[in-house]
Image (spheres, rainbow, N blue to C red):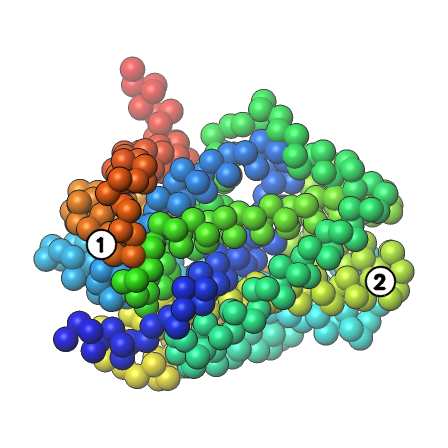
């Protein structure tokens, strides 16, 4: 019976298709918009270092956990926890994931809508900084914002309607290589511009004195957001994975691809920011603070591109925003697939109806946000920076102490016959049972001030 259910839910056509789809989910606005500006406002190289540690020491083990839970159960996040335990509490972990997915998608669609609108503005208009600021004020407010959010959600729903291999897999197989190509060409171009060296130095030289609890907390949140972890996106993608595939190997590729593209995006944006200085465009506000990430990407960068020359500016502008839109699309697909698969599996609704209903419902939240973009920061903080690590902690706990690592290893052995004698088998359980959950918990408690409170008690 499980077999028929699996095939009717859909499956990846190939290993490459799966890796590209999962990497497509991971690579998104998080890498190109959120990451470089987090680096810039959090002490450059120091943040990069902590971020890398979070990705490999916490993110990678959690990714293997999510994929193994998904493949074992052939289920959406809620159904997966139901299948592995009879305790009614655990499916709540899946519910939390679905809720985080819905809320993240609602603001993500708005930001993705801005990037898409910029592709057209870049083609039709050549503007200076003043007018980019005006344009951004116009596009990020009200009706225009709503129209582009709607277009973006429409594109996402139409791909989801195609199903797993014909929709998601086919789209990402095309989009991911184009994205990497554009990124590399642009880095090549920026590297030879005056002022680029300062940006590279800021990015790559860690200043250890900058490492602080808030920096570690942001880096951890960024790692979860960027790797699409903690909300069951990879439980869902894992549920379409065949027993032939080697999960730790696939997870390693996905982590490397995501970290690699974030790193490349930093190589583009950090020098670009410092070039902006040398072109007389300031990236600091009057009080000396770094501008908000949104201003950097949607005002300073376009102005910088256009200060090169009109044609170069347009080519840069169109490529950059097309790149951001494509990266965002492969992520919104996975964000929508989580609640969609939940409704398909648990309520027996047809894919088409499920995707349209949920996409439509989330669009309504996006439209509300379109008219008050100050909501983005709050939703992002609750559901990404706090929500995803919290989900990750619960997943580690569930796998380590409820389902147990022995059962998970048995699942992982499919597609990984050499598992028994591998270092992975010796090390992964320690990370899942102790290191990752304790690190997450400590950071979460630190962020809400409980750690210093407890310290005061002694
Ligand atoms: N990883 C995506 C990005 O970096 C965002 C995302 C988060 C997608 C969670 C799916 C799940 O933009």
Give the number of the mark in front: 2 or 1: 1
- The first of marks 2 and 1 along the sequence is 2
Label 2 sits on a secondary structure element that is: helix
Which class describes the residues within 10 Å of circle 2: few (<14), some (14-19), or many (20+)?
Answer: few
Does residue 162 appear left or right of residue 132 in this picture? left
Q: Which residue is mark 1?
A: 411
Is disc 2 in contact with disc 1, using a CB cutoff of under 8 Å? no
Q: Is residue 58 visible?
A: yes
Asked if disc 1 is less than 8 Å from ligand 1, the answer is no
Q: Quadrant of the C terminus?
A: top left
Residue 81 spot, x, y in % from top left: 20, 58
Residue 296 spot, x, y in % from top left: 70, 51
Q: Measure the C-alpha gap from mark 2 to mark 1.
A: 52 Å
Q: Quadrant of the N terminus?
A: bottom left
Report the residue that reaches farthest toward the right.
Answer: 309
Label 1 sits on a secondary structure element that is: helix
Report the number of numbered marks. 2
Residue 193 spot, x, y in % from top left: 84, 47
Q: Quadrant of residue 12?
A: bottom left
Q: Tell me which residue sits at (39%, 72%) in the image.
A: 13
Q: Tell me which residue sits at (60%, 74%) in the image.
A: 148
Which class describes the residues within 10 Å of circle 1: few (<14), some (14-19), or many (20+)?
Answer: some
In the image, 388 versus 282, the foreground residue is 388
In the image, 265 versus 176, the foreground residue is 176
- Which of the labelled discs sits on residue 451, or is there none? none
Residue 400 spot, x, y in % from top left: 21, 43
């Amino acid at each position: 019976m499980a077999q028929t259910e699996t095939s009717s839910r859909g499956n990846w056509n190939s290993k490459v298709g799966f890796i590209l789809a999962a990497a497509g989910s991971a690579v998104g606005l998080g890498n190109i918009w959120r990451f470089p500006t987090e680096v810039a406002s959090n002490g450059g190289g120091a943040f990069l270092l902590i971020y890398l540690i979070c990705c490999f020491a916490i993110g990678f083990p959690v990714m293997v956990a999510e994929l193994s839970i998904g493949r074992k159960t052939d289920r959406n996040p809620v159904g997966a926890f139901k299948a592995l335990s009879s305790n009614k509490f655990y499916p709540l972990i899946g519910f939390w994931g679905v809720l985080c997915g819905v809320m993240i998608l609602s603001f993500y669609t708005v930001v993705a809508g801005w990037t898409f609108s910029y592709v057209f503005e870049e083609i039709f208009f050549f503007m200076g900084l003043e007018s980019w600021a005006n344009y951004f004020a116009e596009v990020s407010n009200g009706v225009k914002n709503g129209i582009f959010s709607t277009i973006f959600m429409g594109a996402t729903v139409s791909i989801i309607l195609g199903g797993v291999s014909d929709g998601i897999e086919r789209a990402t197989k095309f989009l991911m290589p184009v994205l990497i190509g554009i990124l590399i060409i642009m880095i090549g171009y920026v590297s030879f511009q005056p002022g680029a060296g300062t940006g590279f130095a800021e990015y790559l030289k860690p200043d250890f004195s900058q490492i602080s609890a808030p920096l570690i907390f942001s880096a951890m949140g960024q790692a979860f957001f960027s790797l699409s972890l903690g909300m069951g996106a990879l439980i869902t993608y894992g549920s379409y994975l065949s027993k032939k595939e080697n999960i730790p190997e696939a997870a390693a590729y996905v982590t490397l691809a995501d970290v690699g593209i974030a790193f490349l995006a930093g190589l583009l944006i950090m020098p670009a920011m410092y070039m902006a200085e040398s072109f007389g465009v300031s990236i600091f506000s009057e009080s000396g603070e770094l501008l908000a990430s949104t201003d950097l990407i949607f005002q300073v960068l376009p102005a910088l591109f256009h200060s090169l020359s009109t044609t170069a500016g347009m080519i840069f502008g169109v490529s950059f925003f097309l790149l951001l839109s494509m990266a965002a699309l492969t992520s919104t697909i996975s964000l929508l697939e989580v609640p969609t698969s939940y409704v398909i599996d648990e309520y027996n609704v047809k894919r088409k109806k499920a995707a349209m209903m949920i996409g439509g419902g989330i669009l309504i939240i996006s439209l509300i946000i379109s008219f008050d973009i100050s909501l983005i920061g709050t939703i992002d903080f609750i559901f990404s920076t706090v929500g995803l690590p919290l989900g990750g902690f619960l997943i580690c706990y569930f796998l380590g102490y409820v389902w147990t690592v022995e059962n998970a290893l048995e699942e992982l052995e499919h597609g990984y016959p050499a598992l028994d004698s591998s270092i992975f088998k010796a090390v992964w359980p320690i990370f899942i049972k102790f290191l990752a959950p304790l690190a997450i918990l400590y950071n979460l408690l630190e962020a809400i001030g409980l750690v210093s409170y407890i310290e005061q008690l002694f």
